[in-house]
Amino acid sequence: MSSDGKDPRDEQSSEPGADSGQEREQPEGSVSRDDSVDSKPPAAEEPVDDVSYEYEYDDDEVDQPDDDQPDDDQPEAPEEESTALTTTDPEPAPGTPPPPPPPKSSSDDEDGEDEEEGRMSRMSFLDHLGELRTRIIRMLIGVVVIYLAALVFSPELFVIFRIPFDAAYPGVQLAQLTPTEQFYIQYIKLPLLAAVFLGAPWITLQVWGFISPGLYKRERRYAVPFIFTTALLFILGGLFCYFVALRLALGFLLGLAADAGVQQVISLTSYYNMFFNLHVGMGVVFQMPVVIFFFTLMRITSPEFLLRNSRYAILLIFLAAAIITPTPDVTTMLTFAGPMVLLYYVGIAASYLIVLRRDERKFPWGIFALIVLGLLLLAAAGVSVMVMGMDYQLIQRWPFIVPPGQ
């Protein structure tokens, strides 16, 4: 203590005491410093009147003073300053419509539409029955209209009906066993069969209209290819049966009975039953590429699986041909099995196109041309062996190659 009654420590701590009080009253977020480390007074802040910053805080994020929180847990000054500056767009004026949402990509938009349509396409059981009834009625109306048109050409249809029988084995005649047999076949059964084949596109359209509500939008794009391909393959199956399979089957059966010396009386009904069964059966068999195509589209099968198991598929095809063939000879069975095997590989090609489109790859035209060229060379070699080694003869009408002696 000095002579004037004042403690010298009070003189030394009068200024620092004030400064420490100011430091304790610093605004929130500042960094507290120890006097022993840095005893310099804080630097004067420069005015920033000419620069304006926009600060945006949420109500929940405003720092509230916490007396219990120690000084060491307070955030540092650089981190506090770095979170304040924002570049958000100004809020729209009251009454202004909200801005449009950002554009979605095509894939996201398509998936969203697909999911929505998948939910909207669910119908009750009664709705399905009503839709099925409507499609069946439309199908029948179309078939009846075509039947009435074909009824006008019933004499010509009966002549076309007899051509395969007369060309199969000359000398054998058709017989009428009942008084109404000719009438029913010429004016009812033949025009109705013609209406089924000519109305195949209309029937396929109604089938697609029944199953399309359960499909997504990307799957409905195959409507036109499905209708065109299904109807075309059904008609091609009937034409193949008319010009090839039916004539070979009749030639074998009628020739077998003639060689045995059996007097043949073939009724119109028995011949029509064989005519109808083979034509409709071959039309259904020719739908194999369409079935394989949709199995691949639904990811049930794949081209690799079909090629890997092709030997089993060919075995099943020959078994099916042996069952549906009306004759036990190998030639007729090969006549039925050959197109089925070819259609199986056509279905694999269609399946491969689906996979290429799904993976966004290009079609290998070079490899395809080599495969086609190899098949043509193989067919030419087979014909050459049959003509030069087995004495087969080439003719100018179908089937263009016949066994020796015919």
Image (cartoon, rainbow, N blue to C red):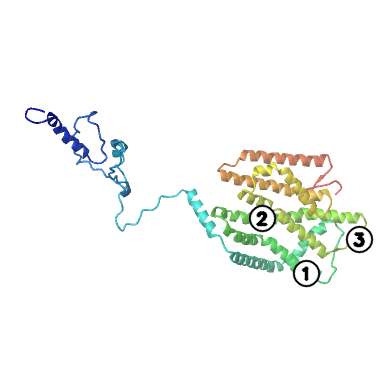
Judged from the image, the secondary structure of the residue bearing numbered disc 1 is helix
Name which residue lies at 84% across and 42% down: 391
Indicate the position of residue 79 as horizontal and vertical percent values: 31, 37
Place of residue 395 in the rendered image (x, y in percent of width and height, measured from the top left): 79, 48
Q: Disc 2 vs disc 3: Cβ atoms closer than 8 Å?
A: no
Q: CA distance from mark 1 to mark 2?
A: 28 Å
Secondary structure under badge 2? helix
Q: Please tell me whether residue 354 is drawn above or below residue 36 in the rendered image.
A: below
Residue labelled with disc 2: 232
Vertical position of residue 278 compared to residue 79: above or below: below
Give yes or no for contact between labels 1 and 2 (Cβ–Cβ under 8 Å). Answer: no
Ranked by sequence position, the earlier of labels 2 and 3 is: 2
Residue named by callout 1: 184
Name, please, the residue furthest toward the bottom: 179
Q: Mark 1 or mark 2: name the one nearer the start of the chain.
A: 1
Q: Which mark is residue 263?
A: 3
Whether pointer 1 and pointer 3 mark residues with C-beta atoms closer than 8 Å, the reply is: no
183 and 156: which is toward the camera: 183
**Quick one: label 3, few (<14), some, or many (20+) residues within 10 Å?**
few
Secondary element under disc 3, as helix, strand or loop, is: loop
